[in-house]
């Protein structure tokens, strides 16, 4: 069993300006063999850190028909070992999740692991103590489409954060009128009963400088101190936005990750980023769709610096000298991370593999065709 990681509280000050570099050894996860449960696609991932390991939950596609959720583990984030069988499968005929199980989002709430996943057009939850064996909630789904127009067709591609005392969810809603996407926000005090924000959606094409006619979707959100940072899908590449409350967002004018825009390339289209902050580096896993229509979906990786970034960690210890007197001592340490020149990325084959800190990196000199409308139908 993998132990959950606890991190010290941190406050982040200064502008958040990630500079991202794609891992040169991409892809990092590919579909299985001909008879495997994920033989025709591996996509829509969520990665968490547990102890010294990374754990990836992803959607596997079997024979271009059945979507199920699997798991893989890694010590460095790029070399992965798959669990041999899916851990969440679609429900029986007539059930709310009979058509698919996809888009996993996993959190640790201090007691157990919770997985939120898409089944059909709604979102359900499952519970686990070991990340392998999952028990679905008897009253699934926990979030359904509507009553607003922006998500009256379906909701999916969600990201859940436990930010005590609340569970917070950012999810993709689709409008039945023209099937456009937008991102909604919901909160819960117990992880089971959710209330959608009355001002939804919180991210739309107009508010996020989104050039894709279909609108923003597939957001991943991390909290950097008191500020929220989101990466989300825009047409064929990934944009980012920041917020102080998780509701009102300011989009960056520059893409976080660009696609190759090459029909022969690995990442002709990139979607559904998964963010994880590791020390001073932001790790990003994402789904890559090769240009060839016959090529399967794969998983790729990039890493980004946050510059300038000042992290202040406060550690408080209390000692009692007498029954009537209590002495509290607080120590504060400040670490500043600044951008440095690009360094060569060590080989992941090395047992002591560590990602180099990457500073100013050249953006791909690519223009994404305005006519590109490559999108998954689900």
Image (spheres, rainbow, N blue to C red):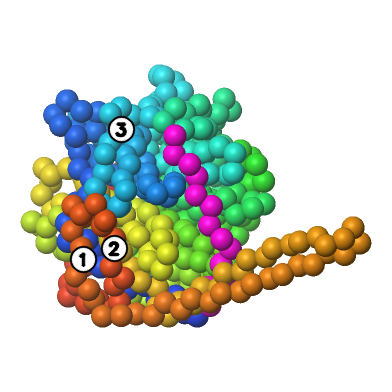
Q: Is residue 212 above or below residue 101?
A: below
Residue at the spot of label 3: 83
- Residue at (50%, 80%) from the top-left corner? 14
- Which of pointers 3 and 2 lies earlier in the amino acid sequence? 3
- Quarter of the view holding residue 378: top left
Q: Is residue 5 magenta?
A: yes
Mark drawn on residue 135:
none
Seen as rendered, the residue at the extreme left is 264
To which residue does mark 1 refer? 345
Of tags 1 and 3, the one toward the viewer is 1
**How far is the residue under mark 1 from the one under mark 3?**
28 Å
The reply to whether the C-beta atoms of the residues labelled 2 and 1 are less than 8 Å apart is yes
Q: Position of residue 293 (x, y in %)?
A: 12, 46
Dot 1 or dot 3: first in sequence order is: 3
Q: Position of residue 31 (x, y in %)?
A: 20, 38
**Which residue is drawn at the image coordinates 53% and 44% (left, top)?**
108
Tell me which corner region of the image, top left, top right, bottom left or bottom right, holds residue 191: top right
195, above or below 16, in the image: above
Magenta stretch in the rendered image: 1-13
């Amino acid at each position: 069993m993998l132990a959950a990681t606890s991190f010290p509280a941190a406050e982040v000050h200064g502008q958040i300006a990630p500079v991202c570099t794609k891992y040169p050894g991409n892809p990092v996860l590919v579909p299985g063999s001909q008879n495997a449960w994920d033989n025709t696609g591996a996509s829509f991932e969520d990665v968490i850190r547990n102890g010294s390991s990374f754990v990836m939950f992803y959607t596997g596609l079997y024979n271009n028909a059945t979507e199920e959720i699997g798991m893989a583990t890694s010590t460095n984030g790029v070399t992965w070992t798959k669990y041999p069988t899916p851990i969440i499968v679609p429900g029986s005929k007539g059930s709310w999740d009979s058509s698919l199980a996809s888009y996993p989002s996993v959190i640790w709430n201090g007691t157990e692991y919770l997985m939120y996943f898409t089944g059909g057009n709604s979102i359900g939850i499952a519970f686990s103590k070991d990340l392998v064996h999952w028990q679905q909630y008897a009253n699934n789904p926990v979030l359904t489409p509507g009553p607003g127009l922006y998500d009256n067709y379906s909701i999916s591609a969600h990201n859940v954060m436990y930010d005590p005392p609340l569970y917070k969810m950012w999810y993709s809603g689709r409008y039945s009128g023209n099937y456009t996407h937008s991102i909604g926000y919901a909160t819960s005090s117990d992880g089971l009963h959710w209330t959608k924000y009355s001002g939804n959606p919180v991210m739309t094409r107009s508010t996020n400088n989104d050039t894709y006619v279909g609108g923003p979707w597939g957001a991943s959100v991390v909290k950097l101190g008191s500020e929220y940072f989101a990466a989300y899908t825009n047409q064929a590449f990934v944009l980012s936005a920041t917020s102080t409350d998780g509701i009102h967002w300011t989009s960056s004018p520059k893409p976080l990750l660009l696609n190759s825009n090459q029909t022969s390339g690995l990442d002709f289209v990139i979607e559904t980023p998964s963010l994880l902050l590791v020390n001073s580096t932001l790790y990003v896993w994402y789904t890559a769709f090769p240009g060839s229509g016959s090529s399967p979906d794969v998983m790729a990786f990039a890493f980004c610096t946050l510059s300038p970034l000042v992290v202040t960690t406060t550690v408080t210890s209390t000692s009692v000298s007498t029954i009537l007197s209590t002495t509290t001592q607080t120590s504060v340490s400040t670490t500043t991370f600044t951008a440095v020149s690009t360094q060569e990325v060590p080989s992941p084959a090395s047992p002591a593999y560590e990602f180099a800190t990457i500073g100013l990196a050249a953006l791909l000199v690519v223009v994404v065709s305005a006519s590109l409308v490559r999108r998954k139908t689900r």
